Amino acid sequence: MLRTENNGVFCAACAMSFLLNLQWGMVTTHLPIYVHELGGSPLEVALIFTVFAGLISFTQPVWGFISDHLGKRKVFMVLGMFGLTPILLLISTQTNTMPLIVLRGSTAIFVGATVPATLALISDISPGKMMGKNLGINSLFDTAGFAVGPIIGGVIADLYGFARLWIFVAGICFAGGSTIPISWFRPAQSEEKPRRATRPRILQSR
């Protein structure tokens, strides 16, 4: 049984983590193939990974610090996912490799905002004794998304081509950004049981 200050938000955060890593699995495995089909060199394929990894190693702590300072975890999660959407749509239109490297690198800005904010939010709404378990549950959704992403991406690329694949991935990011706003319409679930009203002792002593 889930034990958080708001189970709806926790479930939305796990769904967002799944969708984020679903797109991550698709992009990580198929973007190098796409670069190769466009005539890219092995060096350009390597730059796809290096530029992204280098930027995200910088953006994650920066966005994490800003989200701590502002206390706006959900805002960073939503904007991060929505920010990926137009970039992936632009990737679907590219015919040269260098713009792909730049666009892939720019996704690190938004992924770097989403990941630390998600982990911080789950920590914020989890009781101390349940924090490790809840973070583990979120990690399960991370891994599941990355596990099924490559096979789903492979099927879509085979059937419809790479351009349609990136449009599909953009839709996944938009859906991920919508999970938190949807959870706002659900009331927070308190773990405390309502107490029965007791009669004042002055009346009970009659």
Image (cartoon, grey):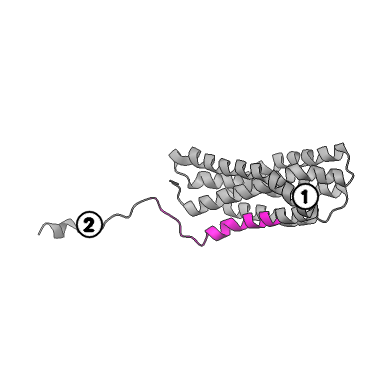
Q: Residue furthest left?
A: 206
Quick check: can you spot residue 78?
yes
Q: Residue at x 73, y 51 (%)?
A: 156
Q: Position of residue 138 (x, y in %)?
A: 55, 43
Residue in front for this viewpoint, 200 or 118: 118
Quick check: can you spot residue 24?
no
Q: Amino acid at mark 1?
A: Asp
The verdict on residue 190 being magenta is: yes
Q: Main secondary structure of the magenta part?
A: helix
Which element type, helix, strand or loop, lies under badge 1? helix
Residue in front for this viewpoint, 46 or 149: 149
Per the rendered image, the range of residues in magenta is 170-191
Q: Residue at x 79, y 51 (%)?
A: 162
Say left or right for 179 vs 174. left
Check residue 198 in the rendering and tell me which mark sits there, or answer none: 2
Q: Which residue is mark 1?
A: 158
